[in-house]
Image (tube, rainbow, N blue to C red):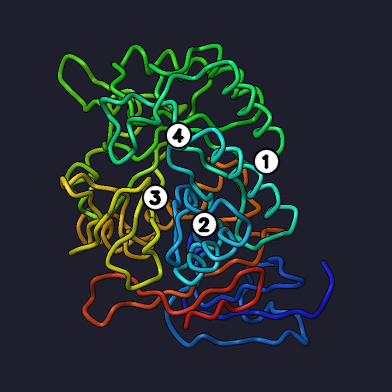
Amino acid sequence: MTGPLSALRAPLIHDGAEWHRDAAVVMQGGTIRAVASPSDIPAGTAVQDLGGGMLVPGYVDLQVNGGDGLMLNDAPEPKTLRRMAQAHARLGATSILPTLITDTPEVTAAAVAAVCAAVAESVPGIIGLHLEGPHLDPRRKGAHDPALIRPMQRQDLDALLAAAHALPVLMVTLAPEAADHGQIAALTRAGAVVSLGHTDADFATCRAAFDAGARCVTHLFNAMRQLGNREPGVVGAALADGRVSAGLIADGIHVHPAAMGAGLRAKAGPGDVFLVSDAMAVAGTDLDGFTLNGRRIGRRDGRLTLADGTLAGADLDLTTALRVLCRDVGLPLGHALRMATAVPARVAGRGGHIGALVPGARADLVHLVDAADGAGPVLAGVWRGGAPVRRD
């Protein structure tokens, strides 16, 4: 690490694992050098005292479909990714997996090429790509276009394997009904994070997919077979298997707070539950809707829905998700923060590089303060690579 030293001081710091009181994050060259007590800050360091609140790692969001008025599906280009990343950085998510919802092979190939180009250009915040579909179960399609859903064929697998080798992180959401064990195993060997989602699979089918290498479940509880007393379904399989982690849309709309709490208490480790926004084009804007695959999606009262009322992504940022977990689920803030930072970083294979305030990690930080109404944390500032992110 080279360059001048700088530091941010706050009454509380959460490093992604534990709390530090009256400490400072020391940075150099866009990288974390240390979390230090004030007396241990090196001489000559430029210190900014935030005065109040807490410093936490920048959020890591592994399911981001759009932002700043754009959907990746509609414009799979590097400039779209740059705008999405900036929109979500303003909301605290300093590392994102842009997510392509089920689309044609041509659009999928364009998205892979766009993310490869963005990574080559070092677009800040883009860590890889999440392909959500098209190899799903149409019975659990959610807002995905059923005309584009299809089983995985040899040419699809070949394209995914090439993408896994080309991208730093590739997450693939699929239904085990639409991809066989050999395909799941091949993707896992290539380094892809295989996640089960939009699936009506039973418990045994999910366990077989986990045995083949799947290690994640996409938006737990949503678009999947639920937990039953005789058939535990996808939810039961995800909660019972310690090898598996699961994303959660914690807006209080997609999943009832009581169900979230029960799931979090039941989850077997070391796999864990992490937060995702499932954000769409409206993120970071005041738009009242957008289109996806030619269909209008409206925004109203915190919901994004198709004309028939089907939920279509979420009108959510991860600071809001933290408030829901703390206020409505009763989760300790430290646990909720890990779900937005260290856990998704580990799922993406980037633990220790992002989502943590540890030596050698990228200097991505979020400043949170308590809401005036006591409803939980409010975003007050963001730094990415040690530089402040403009939020106006």
| Circle 2 residue | 16
| Circle 3 residue | 275
Which mark, by number, is residue 167? Answer: 1
User: Looking at the image, is 61 positioned above or below residue 147?
Assistant: below
Pair 3/4: label in front: 3
Marked residue nearer the N-terminal end (1 or 2): 2
C-alpha gap between disc 3 and disc 2: 14 Å
**At label 4, which amino acid type do we have?**
Gly
Secondary element under disc 4, as helix, strand or loop, is loop
Marked residue nearer the N-terminal end (3 or 2): 2
**At label 3, which amino acid type do we have?**
Leu
Secondary element under disc 3, as helix, strand or loop, is strand
Marked residue nearer the N-terminal end (4 or 2): 2
User: Looking at the image, is 223 positioned above or below residue 250?
Assistant: above
**At label 1, which amino acid type do we have?**
Leu
C-alpha gap between disc 3 and disc 4: 13 Å
Marked residue nearer the N-terminal end (1 or 3): 1
Report whether 175 appears left or right of 347.
left
Which mark, by number, is residue 271? Answer: 4
